[in-house]
Image (tube, rainbow, N blue to C red):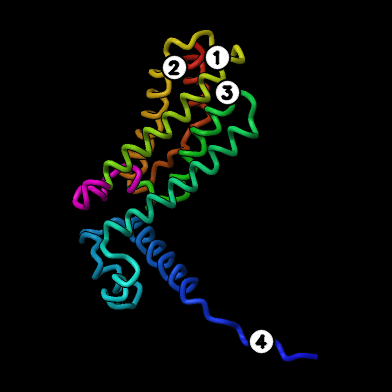
Amino acid sequence: MSTPAPPVSHPRSKAGERRQEILRMLAFLLERPQPEKITTALLARHLQVSEAALYRHFSSKAKMYEGLIEFIEQTLFTRINRIAVELPSGLAQVEATLTLLLAFSDKNPGMTRVLTGEVLHHENERLLVRIVQLCERLEASIRQSLRLAVTHGEISSDRAIAVQANLLMNVVIGRWHQFSSSQFQRSPLEHWDLGWTLLKPLVRL
């Protein structure tokens, strides 16, 4: 019987793991609002590494936030695409998408502060632009599901679809802000079943 080969070290794999560790710590710190700004020095202290070690994986703190935004985008749109495939009803897609956006926030408080943009105001301006674009893409997904609902006769007219999609996205964003401003005490999913019941007739107009 041949002797098993020793495990091979893959520098790229280890670098990827370290990047993920840094992003997880940043998200962790964002879940616990502190009087001091989250700096690379603070992040390095919590990771028990030097700031130079951080910069070997990210050229700046803005790049770290970009990494969080990329995670949010990949997670949300992968699931939204799955919703579009699995649910034939346009209204069911809308409900599932809105619930997904609120549940993601509930599960990831730190990411909520990125979604609202509140932690990005003193960072690179392109980060806020990217969050705006992310919300616009989410609204476009809702709009697409509403068009499907019109096709299936679930909604009487397509005249107000753009307004309806914007209204629903604003409800989500408002719940994100409430969650964050309440120090994560008011869940974005709070009374959501009833909330959707009240919104649904407006969508069907």
Whether residues under marks 4 and 3 lie with C-beta atoms below 8 angstroms apart, the answer is no
Task: Say whether residue 103 is left or right of residue 167.
Answer: right
Q: Quadrant of the N terminus?
A: bottom right
Discs 2, 1 touching: Cβ within 8 Å: yes
The residue that mark 3 highlights is: 90
Q: Which mark is residue 150?
A: 1
Type of residue at label 3? Gly
Q: Earlier in the sequence, mark 2 or mark 1?
A: 1
Where is 172 relative to 151, above or below? below
Question: Distance between the Cα atoms at labels 2 and 1?
Answer: 9 Å
Alpha carbon of mark 4 to alpha carbon of mark 3: how far? Answer: 54 Å
In the picture, measured across the screen, residue 34 lies left or right of residue 202, that is left
**Amino acid identity at mark 1:** Val
Evaluate if marks 1 and 4 touch, with contact meaning CB atoms under 8 Å apart: no
First in sequence: mark 3 vs mark 2: 3
Of label 4 and label 3, which has the lower sequence position? 4
Which mark is first along the chain, 1 or 3? 3
Q: Residue flagged by tag 2: what amino acid is it? A: Ile
> Circle 2 sits on which residue?
161
